[in-house]
Image (tube, rainbow, N blue to C red):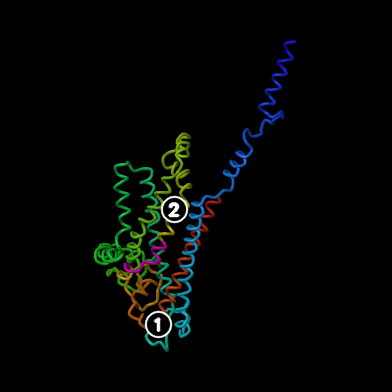
Amino acid sequence: MTDAPTSVSSSAASDKHGGGAHRAPDAPIGDPKEVKIATKTSGSVVRPGDRIFNGLATGSAALITAIIAAIGVFLVWRAIPALQRNTVNFLTSREWNTTDINDMAFGVLDLFQVTVFVSAFALLLAMPLSLGIALYLSHYAPPRVRRPLSYTIDLLAAVPSIVYGLWGILVFAPAIAPFAVWLNENLSWIPFFADGSSSVEGGGTIFTAGIVLAVMILPIITAVSREVFAQTPVMHIEAALALGATKWEVMKTTVLPFGRSGYISGSMLGLGRALGETMALYMILRTTSQPFGWSLFDGGSTIASKIALGYAEFNNDIQAGAYIAAGLVLFLLTFLVNAAARAVVSNKADG
């Protein structure tokens, strides 16, 4: 007799709270409208701030792309009239004579070779130094040394290029001349150290210009590499130490693999700076009429310094077009360098 009322009371309570229906264990509790609103909020609803930011980001990327394309179109448009009057092959000739616009003979071969050679030499010197400095600052240096040394390295990037040029030709070239003479006398059997088109004692050579250029790009590579190496996960480093690795083995197995792509990217940024450097190389390199011979003791002009040297001819559109054509080659060269760097970084990331 006492069980029946209890059963009826339980059933009534169930009908009152659950509506007389059995609810699945995973069914949402509460008002169906609230459930629908919550689902919509957590789904594809986009706030106005997100739309504005998305539009600004997309517009900025499109604007930069349009500006770069406009620069390329301008260079091609202004170079075509001069190229049509050129009497020699622009890509393979070593001549540069734009005095008579009716008989122009100009080629970019020597300028291209000097640009690539001095930039590659500077990068060859700067990359290992930057790697060592970045590793020291990020994982070896005590805090009291790390901060002032980092500031000093970063300040090198703030020195104007014309100051580097003055320092290079007036101070550094006389100081490095005895070493350059020794290299020329004792290693002249190596083509890179053979006699060139410029005086070794005078210092106006690719050897001097390349070392000064290496100092100029060193802070760029160091800064990027240092920041990337400092982001190496602490757990990876501690795991390597726990397995008995030495400090160098930790660098080799964790830090360097983690920061390789950043190190390559920083090096390519430095190479881009080297390819376009103008005033320092304009002041250091001695111009010459002799063909470039792939010696560190050659003189010559890079594409950028040649354009600066011929600034007086820019009052004539045809003569200026010859220099603009050389600038177009430099423009394309930087694109190829950046594309190669992106490919290397992508391959390292996929690996």
- Position in image of residue 50 (x %, y %): 50, 52
Residue 258 shown left or right of residue 297 in the figure: right
- For the residue pair 233 and 30, the one nearer the viewer reads as 30
Percent position of residue 254, x then y: 47, 43
17 relative to 184, above or below: above
**Mark 1: which secondary structure?**
helix
The question of residue 236 being in magenta is answered with no
Q: Amino acid at mark 2?
A: Tyr
Reply above or below: 86 against 10.
below
Q: Disc count in the image?
A: 2
Question: In which quadrant of the rendered image does the N terminus lie?
Answer: top right
- Bounds of the magenta span? 271-280
Front residue of 342 and 107: 342
- Circle 1 crowding by C-alpha within 10 Å: few under 14, some 14–19, many from 20: some
Tell me which secondary structure the magenta stretch mostly adopts: helix
Residue at far bottom of view: 102
Q: Residue at x 34, y 43 (%)?
A: 141
| SS label for mark 2 | helix
Name the amino acid type tagged 1: Asp
The label on residue 317 is 1
Q: Is residue 17 visible?
A: yes
State the image coordinates of residue 340 (x, y, percent, origin top left). 50, 61
Snapshot quadrant of residue 6: top right
Residue 167 horizontal side relative to residue 188, left or right: left
Q: Quadrant of residue 37?
A: top right
- Please tell me in which quadrant of the rendered image residue 145 appears: top left
Label 2: which residue?
263
- Camera-side residue of 310 and 54: 54
- Circle 2/circle 1 CB separation < 8 Å: no
Q: Image check: 260 left or right of 200?
A: right
